[in-house]
Amino acid sequence: MALPFARSFCSCRWGAKRLGVAAAEARRDFSFKLDEKTAHSSLALFRGDTGVKYGIVGLEPTKLALNVQRFWEWAVVLADTAVTSGRHYWEVTVRRSHQFRIGVADVDMSRDSCIGVDDRSWVFTYAQRKWHTMLANEKAPVEGIGQPEKVGLLLEYEAQKLSLVDVSRVAVVHTLQTDFRGPVVPAFALWDGELLTHSGLEVPEGL
């Protein structure tokens, strides 16, 4: 089941405000946008909040509204819709980015951390022309996929799995075993270029 962030009843350990989810119908397709309220000041959203670009200077932090949902230390942005059940698939187009992370995170992960650094986010990271899985700041190499133009992510909540998908072959490249304990959201970090998300997709046949 996919749950929009909008109306909040989930108490969060990282701030006095509450970030939560409202009930939504379970469906095969999973649609989301990127949540500007979570975006680090170096990140700018575009194309209807489905894309994110990195800027070395970025926005002046003092001009941003004070918000406990925002990442202040790391160039991270979360999606606006959480998942609590089901199998869901989305894709990411990579534009001129050579260092980024994509995956999922707990809705209440610390805003002082980066995805992949703590143990409440599960990501695939691309840097120095190599892919790795990353959890709790521990990396493991991922073979069988090169520099991407577009990749897919398959989330299987009950099976506790997150898979990186080669969209050109419609094949799973690597599966990361997870430890979901509550709602999770798509999560992104980047240090150059742009990422464009594509959601509302059905799980491809054969996956």
Image (cartoon, rainbow, N blue to C red):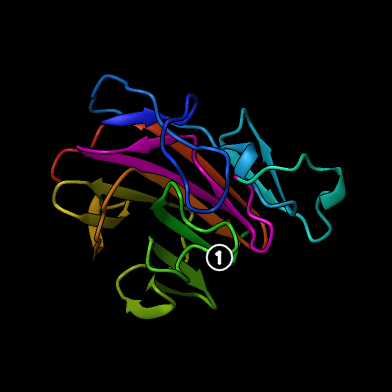
| In-front residue for pair 127/78 | 78
Whether residue 95 is visible: yes
What residue is at 40 percent from the left and 55 percent from the top? Answer: 103
Q: Amino acid at mark 1?
A: Ser
Q: Image height check: is 177 above or below 182?
A: below
The magenta region covers: 69-96
Which quadrant holds the N terminus?
A: top left
Residue nearest the viewer, comparing 139 with 174: 139
Question: Dividing the picture into quarters, in which one does residue 84 lie?
Answer: top left
Q: Looking at the picture, how far across and down is residue 164, in whole percent?
A: 31, 58
Image coordinates of residue 23 in percent, x first then y, are: 32, 22
43 drawn magenta? no
Residue 167 visible here = no
**75 sits left or right of 34 in the view:** right
> Relative to 85, does residue 122 appear above or below in the rendering?
below
Give how far across and how far down residue 144 sits, in percent.
30, 71
**Circle 1 sits in a helix, a strand or a loop, which is it?**
loop
| Residue shown at the point (41%, 53%) measured from the top left | 105
Estimate the x, y position of residue 89 in percent, counting from the top left.
30, 40
Left or right of residue 158: residue 131:
right
Residue farthest to the top, as pictured: 25
State the residue at coordinates (27%, 57%): 163
